Image (cartoon, rainbow, N blue to C red):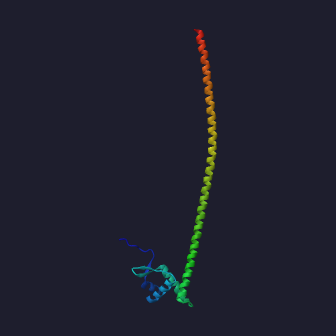
Amino acid sequence: MLKVVPTEKTYEASIFAEKLGVSSSTLRNYKSQFAKAGVTFRNHKGKTIYTENDLLLFNKMLNLHKQGGKTIKDCVLTVLSVQDSQDSTQDNQDSMDNIKDNQDSFQEYAITFKQYEDIIKRLEIQEQELQKYKAQIERRDRQVTELMRQMQELRKQTCRKRAWRMFWKN
């Protein structure tokens, strides 16, 4: 049986609470505040599993709360709004990177397209030259055919003269 190995470091609730420096019941309270704000946490066999990303979120919330003046709920909402704006900024950066990649690709295609246009122009010139040569060959073939007809006519005429000479000589 294959076992899925997580790529991100995960923590059980007790270890996660220890890393945050809070009790398990306080962690449950924080988790419920995040859950009310729409954050979901992974579960494994009925137990909540926390990730490194969750640890960052909780630490940011705790640091904001330690600065004073805000409730846990307000701190959670502030951290999530900052996280959303950072995600949005990252998405914008990713979009800009994609645009730059697309511009680079477009420039490469434009260069390739230009090369194809040059090739097509050269082929058109070669096609014109080929048509010119073909016309010259056809003209030459007509001349050769005409010369052969003239030669056959001359041969016929010379053969007739001989035939009369032969007749009179006998």
Above or below for 161 versus 29? above
Q: How many marks?
A: 0
Q: Residue at x 58, y 72 (%)?
A: 93
Residue 161 lies left or right of residue 33; in this view the side is right
Q: Residue at x 61, y 24 (%)?
A: 151
On-image quarter of the N terminus: bottom left
Instruction: Report x, y in % for residue 3.
Output: 38, 73
Give the quarter of the image for residue 14.
Answer: bottom left
Above or below for 59 versus 100? below
Give the quarter of the image for residue 106.
Answer: bottom right
Q: Residue at x 54, y 90 (%)?
A: 71
* Residue 23 seen in render: no
Instruction: Report x, y in % for residue 76.
Output: 53, 85
Q: Residue at x 62, y 53 (%)?
A: 117
Above or below for 34 versus 102? below
Instruction: Report x, y in % for residue 25.
Output: 44, 89
Instruction: Report x, y in % for residue 90.
Output: 56, 74
* Residue 93 seen in render: yes
Kindly give the residue lying farthest to the left in the view shown.
Answer: 1
Kindly give the residue lying farthest to the top in the view shown.
Answer: 170
Front residue of 13 and 81: 81
Front residue of 120 and 38: 38
Kindly give the residue lying farthest to the bottom in the view shown.
Answer: 69
Front residue of 103 and 164: 164
